[in-house]
Every structure is written in C-alpha cells, then in structure tokens.
Amino acid sequence: MLATASQRILGQSFQNIRPAVSVLRSYSSAAKQITVRDALNSALDEEMSADPKVFLMGEEVGEYQGAYKITKGLLEKYGPERVLDTPITEAGFTGIGVGAAYYGLKPVVEFMTFNFSMQAIDHIINSAAKSNYMSAGQISVPIVFRGPNGAAAGVGAQHSQCYASWYASCPGLKVLSPYNSEDARGLLKAAIRDPDPVVFLENELLYGESFSVSDEVLDSSFCLPIGKAKIEREGKDVTITAFSKMVGYALKAAEMLEKDGIYAEVINLRSIRPLDRSTINASVRKTNRLITVEEGFPQHGVGAEICASVVEESFAYLDAPVERIAGADVPMPYAANLERLAVPQIEDIVRAAKRACYRSVPLAATA
C-alpha cells in the first residue's frame, strides 16, 4: 500500500510547496495565545497540505488522534494513506519510514515516548543518519523522528530519560528541542523541510502550556533556521544556556536573580545538533560566566559539550568556573519526592548563578 501511495504522490505536482525560509511580509504586532500542542498540530497540518510527500506514522496517531493529541484531526483531513496507525513495533515502523524516505517521501515518525526509540535505534543511527555519507551524497533521508523526551511526572525510569546527548553525538542527525509555541511551529516546519534525518525532542509537560505568538509565527510560511539559538533574555552578569522545559526554569531563575542585582542572559538553544557555538561564546565573552542547564544525566551531557566549547574558544574571558546543572546521575525514581530531587529546580540555577557571581553566602557564615 505504501509503495502504491508513494508512486501516486511522487507523480503529483509540487508547485504549491512553500520555501524553507520565511518571506518578508508585514504583520500585525498583536500577540495571540497558542498551546505547544496546537502549534505542533498546525505545523504538521500546514506541511502536509503544502507537500503531498509528507505523511505521518506511529502508534495511535490516526484513529486515537495521537497519544497526546498532536495529530488531532489529521486522519479525517488527509486519510489513512497519509496518517498511518502502526502496530506496537518501533523497529518495524521506523524501518518502513526510513525506507519511504529513501524512496523520496517525507515521513514524520512519532514515538509515544523517545524511551521507546531505543527499540528502533539501529534504523535511526545506522539506516537514517549514516546513509547520506556512505552513499557519497547520493541518498537523502528526509525523515523526522518526533515525540516527548525527558522527564514527565510519575512515570518511572523507563519513561523519563532525556536522549538529547545520545542523538546529538551522532554525525548525520540534526537534533532539535523546542521550548515554546514559536519554537514548536518554526522548528517542526524546518525539520520536515530538511533533506536530512531530524530528531525532534518535545516535552510532555509543555504540550498544554500556552505562549504568546505573533501573526508572523502563525503565517504558513514561518520557519526557524536549524542551528541557531535564541537569546530569550539579555543580561550582562552570567550566561545561562538551556533547552526544552529548562528554558522556562532559567527565565524564572533570571527574574529571581535580578532582584539581587544579577542580570542573567538566558539562551534557548533550540538546536542541539548543530549547536550554535558562536551565540554561546559571544554571550560568555560579554558576561564572563556560564551556567548550563539540562534535565539529562550529567556525564557526557549537552552541558558538558557546551562547557568544552567555551573552554576551548573563550577560556580567557571566564571570571569564574563554569557550572553544570543537570539531572541526578541515577535512573529516575518513581516516588514523587525523590523524582523532584532527581531533576533540576529553579533554586538550583539561582544558587549556581550566585556562586558564579561570588554572591553566595559562605557555609561558615550560616553556621
């Protein structure tokens, strides 16, 4: 069925496909509220409408409208040939998706959680990520692997792991992680239009969060560049890098720090691979201090890579040791009180920033 559908799709005209870069237009400055869930849904809908080669597949993406309702309404609109419910076999449907991408289609494969992508990692790494290089550029693999990543709430160790550093360590993959609704729309559109395999790491706890977006973001041509971070808040005293849910924590920490006269610059990484090293280093050369924040394990993490980049490129500008805030180096506990201790909290970021700025109270003084 898939081959028949792909032959019919490839034979259609693609004159209505939008470019991967937004065109210049005039927009209203009025902001609207949209949830991350709706931002992802609208991005999928618009890209499927614009490009008949785009199709969705995964567990419960069709009849159930997605485990988290990201694909709501798309089966009814585009039919079962472009919204495919799969059996519970990640290795199987991921392999089918990669094969379809070899053929010229643009699959968007949903994992109910990225923990389950471990069942399919051979296809993601060996089949998707390496094929372009091994074929000397003759084979493109335009596929998106998307779904919730990292800690949720009360789902235990096997459903709570962050895979950002795992996939970001592999050449041939691009790894994106949105924070707000603007990120979700712009980065998912960029991922679908990209000719290479993209791992798209969402956060379950952010799906229902609402964020203000402009008319430009809601325009169907809107698209964010891959590999470019965003400075969410400017500051002069300390740089804080974060991605996904931790961006919100970093912004709240920055508000608290400002009350103590510390002005933090918060960088939303958006893209984990490629990493926007130039924006990070430019910020550190201005603030002379660095705090990295992530939910994943501390060893070999995204923060470790950022620290290495800053030490290599901007060491002479540092006025304090770099600090990494990360998840605890243990499998995620199930008990709620232990779970909270295992993931970074806002107060952890505040304390680290104060240490970097030499504002923390010495332990001897509190005795």
Image (cartoon, rainbow, N blue to C red):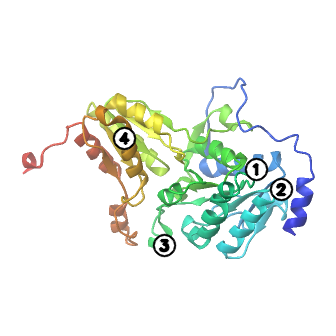
Q: Which mark is residue 158?
A: 3
**For residue 135, which numbered disc appears in the image?**
none
Residue type at mark 1: give it.
Asp
Extreme top residue here? 26
Marks 2 and 3, the one that precedes in the sequence: 2
Residue 1, compared with residue 146, is above or below; it is: below
The earlier-in-sequence mark between 3 and 4 is 3
Where is mark 2, residue-wise? 77
Depth check, front residue: 355 or 310? 310
Q: Position of residue 49 (x, y in %)?
A: 82, 48
> What residue does disc 1 label?
45
Q: Nearer the viewer, mark 4 or mark 2?
A: 4
Q: CA distance from mark 1 to mark 4?
A: 43 Å
Nearest to viewer (mark 3 / mark 4): 4
SS at mark 4 in the image:
helix
For label 4, the residue is 312
Q: Vertical placement of 342 versus 53: above or below?
A: below
Residue type at mark 4? Glu
For label 3, the SS is: helix
Q: What is the spatial separation of the Cα atoms under label 1 and label 2, in whole angstroms? A: 9 Å
The image shows residue 44 at horizontal and vertical percentages of 72, 51
Question: Callout 4 environment at 10 Å: few (<14), some (14 to 19), or many (20+)?
Answer: few
For the point 19% across and 42% down, the residue is: 360
Give the crowd class for mark 1: few <14, some 14-19, many >=20 residues within 10 Å. some
Residue 209 located left or right of residue 303: right
- Report the residue at 54% width, 57% height from top: 170
- Measured as percent of width and height from the top left, residue 5 is found at 88, 62
